[in-house]
Amino acid sequence: MRQVIIIGSGPAGYTAAIYAARANLNPLVVASSVEAGGELMNTTEVENFPGFPEAIMGPDLMAKMQEQAERFGAEVLYDDVVELDIDGPVKKITLGSGGSHEADAVIFATGSAPRKIGIEGESRLSGRGVSYCATCDGFFFRERVIAVVGGGDSAMEEATFLTKFASKVYVIHRRDELRASKIMQDRAFKNEKIEFVWNSEVVDILGEDAVTGIVLQDTVDGSTRELPLDGVFVAIGYDPRTHLVHHKLDLTPEGTVWVDGRSSRTSVPGVFAAGDVIDPTYRQAVTAAGSGTVAALDLEHYLAGLGEAGEPDAAGDQIAGLPEVSTV
Ligand code: NAP
């Protein structure tokens, strides 16, 4: 039996692994059978991760994080967790390949996935004009014409942010009123670079190697038309990857895993959560890495407090020297 299993290999999972490995906990990181490294594997240059003034490619950053975790003794498994048994003091994971592992504690860092429109050109041109992250990719659209799809706060925030770079930003929304908060709407309405395209759905994204336009369908009369542009930012919401823990861990109204205040402690003792799966707001590589640190430190204190019976004692429940965190 292990002391720690970490599920997820994004910045939260690998940072938790670095800390847990340096604490001699020999963590097992279950990193996905498809693509280890999380969402940053789909990004090109990462320009806002501190320590890389010349920028670093997303996959290179993740490779370095993995290397750093392995250097201290983390073991990375290219497999998927398909079942999680976390009720008792011994936590058990079952893998897609059929094997299983047990541990005293688990860090759940499965991230979140941007919701996709679900049309053919979207996946084909992803990273070549189709983006899910304005702060990551906006810089590449200087003086270009782009569209933001969505009518919520994310879409308003991204559209407003993108006017720093783009010459024009269309906001494509499927209804004739926005879901976004009034203040975010007003900010977007006042911005002269933003033009709203109402009652419209993106039904195709055009281009061979780069985006050249989109096909819009009117949701009222069904008519279609082409709109030439250089980029499409999809901002129709994010879905935290929580399918493994439904009915096992408490979730928040936003659908993220509930944690106790600023800690990483979930509703189940010995299970900690970190990164995008607990964060409906910031979703940055660096905040996820910080969150992974919190999880590893919480977990260390939990393990240190495990009594003879395998249950946490009072010291293990709370980081010594820190004030009690409030419950959200
Ligand atoms: P959201 O509030 O769920 O809005 C998603 C938007 O995308 C809606 O307008 C929705 O249209 C549209 N949409 C959904 N699926 C679509 C599809 N398949 N095709 C076309 N359009 C689609 O998501 P969000 O904007 O990411 O916000 C998530 C949460 O984070 C919210 O609670 C939000 O307030 C919060 N947030 C806050 C801030 C901030 O305060 N600074 C910034 C970002 C996000 P309908 O309106 O027709 O459903």
Image (cartoon, rainbow, N blue to C red):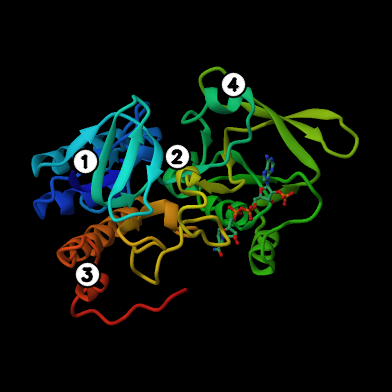
Q: Is residue 13 visible?
A: yes
Q: Which residue type does callout 1 highlight?
A: Leu
The residue singled out by tag 2 in the image is 140
Task: In the rendered view, tell whether residue 124 sits above or below residue 72.
Answer: above
Q: Which mark is residue 207?
A: 4
Do the CB atoms of the residues marked 4 and 2 lie less than 8 Å apart? no
Between the residue at mark 2 and the residue at mark 3, the CA separation in whole angstroms equals: 47 Å
What x and y, as percent, mark residue 6? 28, 46
- Which secondary structure lies at badge 2? helix
Between the residue at mark 4 and the residue at mark 3, the CA separation in whole angstroms equals: 56 Å
- Which secondary structure lies at badge 4? loop
Q: Which of marks 2 and 3 is in front?
A: 3
Residue farthest to the top? 208
Disc nearer the start of the sequence (4/1): 1
Disc nearer the start of the sequence (4/3): 4
Between the residue at mark 1 and the residue at mark 2, the CA separation in whole angstroms equals: 37 Å
The residue singled out by tag 1 in the image is 28
**Within 8 Å: ligand 1 and the Cβ of disc 1?**
no
Residue farthest to the right? 221
Do the CB atoms of the residues marked 4 and 1 lie less than 8 Å apart? no
Q: Which residue type does callout 3 highlight?
A: Gly
What x and y, as percent, mark residue 219? 83, 38
Q: Which mark is residue 316?
A: 3
Q: Hey, which quadrant is residue 320 in on the image?
A: bottom left
Q: Nearer the viewer, mark 3 or mark 1?
A: 3
Q: Hey, which quadrant is residue 216 in on the image?
A: top right
Between the residue at mark 3 and the residue at mark 1, the CA separation in whole angstroms equals: 21 Å
